[in-house]
């Protein structure tokens, strides 16, 4: 069975899952928190804000 949904809402959930994965890897697995991770997280969060702003 296929569900039809708004693409912008599905994209938000997809992109937010990456941010949750980064947060959990730092908190639970004690991954290193480098400037590259910070920059990537900021860019992904700004992309989420652009998608929700519409």
Image: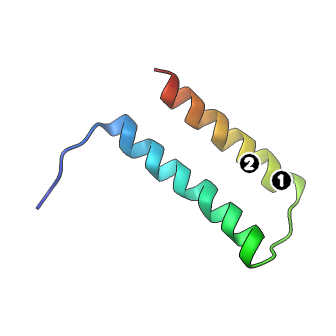
| Residue 11 figure quarter | top left
Above/below status of 53 relative to 10: above
The numbered disc on residue 54 is none
**Residue found 64% across the figure and 43% down from its top:** 44
Residue most toward the left?
1
Q: Position of residue 4 (x, y in %)?
A: 18, 45
Q: Position of residue 19 (x, y in %)?
A: 63, 54
Does 8 sit left or right of 6 as displayed?
Answer: right
Label 1: few (<14), some or many (≥20) within 10 Å? Answer: few
**Residue found 81% across the figure and 50% down from its top:** 38
The numbered disc on residue 36 is 1
Q: How is the image coloured?
A: rainbow
| Residue 49 figure quarter | top right
> Which residue is the site of mark 2?
40
Between 36 and 22, the residue placed more toward the observer is 22
**Residue found 45% across the figure and 49% down from its top:** 13
Does 43 sit left or right of 7 as displayed?
Answer: right
Above/below status of 21 relative to 40: below
| Residue 2 figure quarter | bottom left
Residue most toward the top?
54
Residue most toward the front?
27
Q: Position of residue 45 (x, y in %)?
A: 65, 40
Residue most toward the bottom?
29
Q: Are marks 2 and 1 in contact (CB under 8 Å)?
A: yes
**Residue found 77% across the figure and 68% down from its top:** 26
């Amino acid at each position: 069975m296929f569900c039809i949904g708004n693409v912008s809402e599905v994209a938000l959930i997809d992109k937010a899952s990456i941010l949750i994965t980064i947060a959990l890897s730092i908190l639970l697995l004690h991954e290193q928190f480098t400037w590259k991770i910070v920059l990537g997280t900021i860019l992904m969060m700004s992309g989420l804000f652009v998608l929700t702003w519409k």
